[in-house]
Image: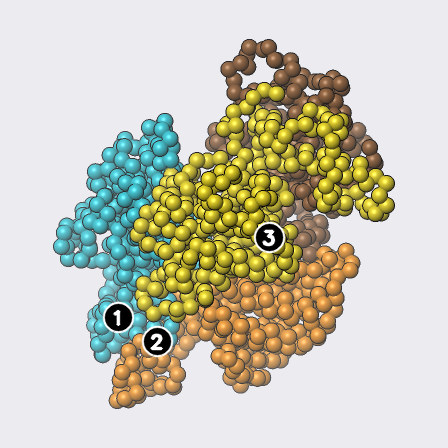
Chain colours: A yellow, B brown, C orange, D cyan
Amino acid sequence: MHEVDLDKYDLRTDLIIEQNIDNIKNNSYDENGVHVDDIILKKNNNLNKKQGKYVTISYSDITDSNNFKNVLEILEKEFYKVLKYCKIKKDDSCLIIGLGNRKIISDSLGSKTIDEVIVTRHLYKMGDVDKNYRNVSILEPNVIGVTGIDSYEIIENVIKEIKPDFIICIDSLCAMNIERLNKTIQITSSGITPGSGIGNTKKELSKDTLKIPTIAVGIPSVVNTSVIVSDTINYILKKIGYLKNNINNNKDKLKPVNKINYLKELNDLSSIEKKEVLGYIGLLDNDSLKKLIWEVLSPINADMIVTTKDIDFIMEKNAKLIGTALNNILHNFN
Amino acid sequence: MHEVDLDKYDLRTDLIIEQNIDNIKNNSYDENGVHVDDIILKKNNNLNKKQGKYVTISYSDITDSNNFKNVLEILEKEFYKVLKYCKIKKDDSCLIIGLGNRKIISDSLGSKTIDEVIVTRHLYKMGDVDKNYRNVSILEPNVIGVTGIDSYEIIENVIKEIKPDFIICIDSLCAMNIERLNKTIQITSSGITPGSGIGNTKKELSKDTLKIPTIAVGIPSVVNTSVIVSDTINYILKKIGYLKNNINNNKDKLKPVNKINYLKELNDLSSIEKKEVLGYIGLLDNDSLKKLIWEVLSPINADMIVTTKDIDFIMEKNAKLIGTALNNILHNFN
Amino acid sequence: MHEVDLDKYDLRTDLIIEQNIDNIKNNSYDENGVHVDDIILKKNNNLNKKQGKYVTISYSDITDSNNFKNVLEILEKEFYKVLKYCKIKKDDSCLIIGLGNRKIISDSLGSKTIDEVIVTRHLYKMGDVDKNYRNVSILEPNVIGVTGIDSYEIIENVIKEIKPDFIICIDSLCAMNIERLNKTIQITSSGITPGSGIGNTKKELSKDTLKIPTIAVGIPSVVNTSVIVSDTINYILKKIGYLKNNINNNKDKLKPVNKINYLKELNDLSSIEKKEVLGYIGLLDNDSLKKLIWEVLSPINADMIVTTKDIDFIMEKNAKLIGTALNNILHNFN
Amino acid sequence: MHEVDLDKYDLRTDLIIEQNIDNIKNNSYDENGVHVDDIILKKNNNLNKKQGKYVTISYSDITDSNNFKNVLEILEKEFYKVLKYCKIKKDDSCLIIGLGNRKIISDSLGSKTIDEVIVTRHLYKMGDVDKNYRNVSILEPNVIGVTGIDSYEIIENVIKEIKPDFIICIDSLCAMNIERLNKTIQITSSGITPGSGIGNTKKELSKDTLKIPTIAVGIPSVVNTSVIVSDTINYILKKIGYLKNNINNNKDKLKPVNKINYLKELNDLSSIEKKEVLGYIGLLDNDSLKKLIWEVLSPINADMIVTTKDIDFIMEKNAKLIGTALNNILHNFN
């Protein structure tokens, strides 16, 4: 097919887990229905990502209060390990930065999370604080499209003034996989570039640029329509593969067709079979498929960033989850 | 392929314009970049829709203030015609019902629109109102999942009490076409079934059930991921068709690939070509394609209802648009 | 002085506790810093109030989480007694009505409380509910100034349709005493007249009018400036009385003047002393004083209903308190 | 009476107009029901206020759309004069700072106003802006009690980075007079000390500290209960004075007692009469009266900052008023 300049479209992911990381996992485990992947990236790694510790917590739901508690417990445990990895001490002061735009719900994880945080820096300035509480302050720089000021310009200068020992940035992320929407938390010691998931070029917030440990936490809450389509085309092939291999399999006989999770087994089709089912499209590799779909959707303005219908409700839960974890691990830290 | 019970999934549309209506258009016109289609459906029509007048106003944007004014002007003109069609008189009292759920932004068109309406019924009860103002009241029944009460139960009984001469229902709709999201207003004299676009079974609000003229107004603000995918698969075929027919066409030489609107021309592929490009999938008719995609997405919980990332901002504009039109045509009515 | 028509102004209180009830208290107690007064009024009582059980819970603060728990515990215990008094049974269905106006924070207790309630009526309609959950639905009729429809008109007709066994009405109240603002909960079996605290004439919601037990719960969140002034004039006399009796009292020597709570003792001045301190004003009885102040403030539009600066924050706590109590006592009821 | 340390309580006003300024008015006029007072204060003035231009615009209502237009027109005219006084040029870049706390409605004028402002600085950075639009950015530092960071610390450092030519600060003010609540706009070239109206000690935002012209705009939206009471006690004396002088005056015979505006005439009582009416209290000068009332209210926690019940609605109008004026005079500036 014709060539596309890869730089013209930007379907990057904010999530390390969506890259090919099978060989570099440091540690993975399952607990109470929650899955954790821990990765340590070295400098100049193949993923072209910054070095550091990346923890990915995957789960199916936090709207149920039991699931919420299970995810919270693991989030606190893993967050604590990231603080240790960054050599954060009990008395280190922390600035928590809520990135994104409070008025766009799908982009409000940062703003809504810092609303939950127990703030103490002003009490420290007045003296006489219960020492179980860490020195914590918050900042909501908002986005340049609203304020006319790059969030980096605000953050860099406020840090110069208040000199926190480390910072934690919270942001809504962009997923490259519809199954991860609001079902994954990523914590990383490598910082974040605000807006990096949706194709803007902004300055990086990291230890390299800010000279203090810079931890980033995010949950993917938006996805590109191109991603939805290319995911689905791959699923079509997997579903057909499953059906082919299970056509005479009695176990599915009584199940409704929409209850059979065909992804649980590997049932890859041969190239000939793929061509049979999906023509030339079935033979494209993932990158070429995404390029094609982007070329199909963008001329008709259908290459949109979308979010789930009930994002208002879920974002409240997401912010409560991270805010509670931050209060529990920053204050009363041992 | 295997069979699917059509009733098991519900990818219905709230929009008449998304059905095959080419032969039954009453009137269509373009004005200031806005397109209007006016349809009168008779009883027992082929579309299996209720009889009545259906006006569809299509536009590309209302976030620009000039476009907003252009759409508003046409909306008022067309709404006035629907009132005339329903034989509404200057002195008839009106109850405006904001359907949907205020707390889910994508479902809040009804609630946010009635916030804009000038309400006068209580002034009429006290006597001595400027007669240029119609007797108008509003009602926000909310959704059964929040209140435990079917909106129909509330509406039916409030109407019995306050006896309006006619009602106008405002609701967020579900689109079956990604291009229509927040870019179409439908006004109909045939009423509405709340939640009908997303597969719930609820009672119809219409002249048949409520015994007074029941006008419904809506803007589609959510879409199903299955719809996004099946639309895109069709666009792939159209794009390939366009490329085939224009491969040596100099007019596109200097255009970037993502700026060529391939939908403007008809370039259908032959069946053999479709099979070449998209295999068996390319040969499916629209209904079978949607069924297949639903079967692929629903077992893995990826059959989601989504909305655009900036829905917060757009919903404000949508509500302002309809609310302003309602105030202008209901009050000072000639 | 000149005469005033008592009906011309309306400085009524929603709180039974602000009336002269010393002789008719059924039961009073203190527990964990919370004070409870329980009154049973008979028909044709001297207070000119409807018969029934009136429970008043007084406290100094619920913004502290320990105080919140203490008040919640007593609220649940007392609310349970009111349900028993009204002969509510384990299986009786309940409609909870959030009165007031969501968009005026000081009037939003009803709306914000029902946001917290676990709703089940729709699940009962579908069958198969865990029987520990009572059949509960909610209704938010809003105020006539916003909707054009009297809340009574909506409530009466919805009750006819859904036939709950009893109702609970939640509303923001008007205090006649600045010390009670956001520091008192009143629960009564006698119902409520929406807006009765601020001088509107509306229909009563009660067992007499609705034919089912009608419990009302409220917290005072606004107060009239006239009340603030007449309270203060009385406090001036009490403070002077205290100072006169304690002028040589060593116990206050080291206390800052603004830390001595002079209300804790009775130090009434004689009429001659009152006239000395406050002239003729000092001799007015309470009703005449309030009339005078109303006559002074209303011609210059300074007779305002005010609320505390931090009402946004406190209203969240108030709604959380009542909502949590309702969930705990309605569901899992023994 | 006993002595009070004046520093112990702080009933300061943010409004120059509430001080004794009769001799120093530069210019005053009435237009369309709006009153304007223009004052130029020199260094080391008797009011102990910073030098500069102070414009006070007084009106009775902006909830009516005609009144809104009248006030807006005068606000723009007077704001323009302040810009001229500060020697602001057509091309000067402006940073608009929304002070206060978005989540406390009575303190949200700053936040809500900047929501209305047309922001362009990011477009200037990208080049190619319509030169009728000034370079404008916004900043919302929030309050130290929420963020742990003094707003001054944020503002000072952001200014160092983005180097605006001048700044405009918007804040909710504290009134010392109940009649001024939401009925006065003050514009001054002398800057502002955030929170100065309610007794906190914070750093001043002004040309002296920030080295660039610093204009402050505010509307009083809260008042102290002490102020309400001392105002009313003064009104009592004025009302009695009016009644004494008009007891046989036929003009009031048919007017209801609460419709006679007794403030319009000067009817001062003699000292003997004051003592007759209000005892010793009637003889106190204004400062001693306020001290006394503060001493009466603060020991019983009734010395509260209050706001009007409908502040939610009025704050929207206030923000719309100032935001619209800013857009009209900053952009398209001649």
Q: Is residue D44 left or right of residue C210?
A: left
User: What separation in Å lies between label 3 and label 2 (alpha carbons)?
Assistant: 61 Å
Q: Is A165 above or below relative to A105? A: below
Residue B206, position as x, y percentages in the image: 72, 41
Q: Which residue is mark 3?
A: A28
Which amino acid, by three-letter code, is at mark 2? Pro
* Of the pair C250 and B311, the residue shown nearer to us: B311
- The answer to whether mark 3 and mark 1 are in CB contact below 8 A is no
User: What separation in Å lies between label 1 and label 2 (alpha carbons)?
Assistant: 13 Å
Q: Chain of mark 3?
A: A
Tell me the residue at 30%/55% (across/down). Answer: D194
Res. D285 image quadrant: bottom left
Q: Chain of mark 2?
A: D
Residue D257, position as x, y percentages in the image: 39, 63
Q: Is residue B331 left or right of residue A115?
A: right
Q: Secondary structure at mark 1?
A: helix
Q: Which residue is mark 1?
A: D8
